Image: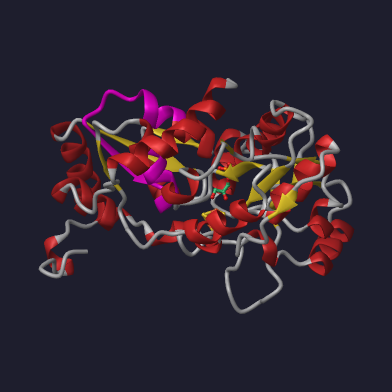
Amino acid sequence: MLLADKPSDIPQGDALLDAIERLRKERNAVILAHYYQESEIQDLADFIGDSLQLAKAARDTEADVIVFCGVHFMAETAKILNPDRIVVLPDLEAGCSLADSCPADELAAWKADHPDHLVVSYINCTAATKALSDIICTSSNAVRVLESLPEDKPVLFAPDRNLGSWVQRQTGREMDLWQGTCIVHETFSEQKLLDLKQQHPKAKVIAHPECEPHILAYADHIGSTSSLLRYTQESGFDSFIVATEAGILHQMQKKSPDVELIPLPGMDDSCNCNECPFMRLNTLEKLYLCLRDLQPRIELPERQRVAALKPLERMMALG
Ligand code: 13P
Ligand code: SF4
């Protein structure tokens, strides 16, 4: 919110939704939302998706303005892929613990210590870190990306050690792993998972690969947010214990109103630890303000953008 904005300057209720609708048309804007956004943001988005789907939607849009309802690295990716658009993020503080764990200078030092290695970076990293990478992956294509690399080349994988070790188990390929984690997915409680499995013996456990290996060991299905959503729609089962950020439950329930969805809680009962505090910084009010003011914008030095584009395009070329 701009300092000058009193809460009374911001329309409320239906007037807020009407104002967003009017501004979306006036600005020729597209609203992209990740599955972890608040339900009310998902409900008015033009497109909802996982990080790969959103990157493709951002690359392909012809709208003048991309309102990215997600976190900073996602909006940055949109700007890298489609630099002629204005890209706004409702709250510039919407970061990511994985991106924060891997500053570009530290990755550069790691690379310098391993000059023969290829660098595969999870899309959850900054543009500066992407610019130092050979190829990017997301949770939906990480296995395919690894399988596309020459077998004789050693690999550094950053920044998510849990996604990295899951990919190692899937592909049998040894990699050196950066030790980053997602503050949401590392918090799930094994004991609570066991209790829930006992209470709901027919429920299938579905988990995002950012979860710790001891949680993934119980999973009937592991995949990106879009893959987990598809599984709840297509697997034929009717009860699921969901080990990922709780925002995804909204689309799961919308698409399959009759399935039972049981969110896995975090270890700490005193917080909603299965909600990403960064994702949840975006609100309808901030969405309205960024459409009105076309701020805060994502801007990147052109050299860095072009360097970060290369590994993203290598990933995109894999289909
Ligand atoms: P996906 O969108 O690839 O499933 O990743 C989830 C996530 O944590 C994004 O920050
Ligand atoms: Fe980052 Fe985890 Fe939040 Fe995704 S859920 S944006 S990985 S902190």
Residue 76 falls inside the magenta stretch: yes
Query: Is residue 317 left or right of 259 when viewed as pictured?
Result: left
User: Which residue occupies the foreground of this view, 45 or 178?
Assistant: 178
Q: From the viewer's perspective, is residue 240 above or below residue 192?
A: above
Which residue sits at x=20%, y=52%?
295
Task: State the extent of the magenta-drawn residues as a range.
Answer: 56-78
Q: Quadrant of ligand 2?
A: bottom right
Q: Position of residue 90 (x, y in %)?
A: 30, 53
User: Which residue occupies the foreground of this view, 313 or 214?
Assistant: 313
Which residue sits at x=37%, y=45%?
76
Q: Position of residue 240 (x, y in %)?
A: 75, 46
Q: Position of residue 312 (x, y in %)?
A: 49, 33
User: Which residue occupies the foreground of this view, 271 or 255?
Assistant: 271
Residue 170 is at least partly visible in this image? yes
Which residue sits at x=25%, y=54%?
13
Total labels: the figure holds 0
Q: Position of residue 33 (x, y in %)?
A: 42, 42
User: Which residue occupies the foreground of this view, 22 or 56?
Assistant: 56
Q: Quadrant of the C terminus?
A: top right
Furthest toward the bottom, the residue is 270
Q: Quadrant of the N terminus?
A: bottom left
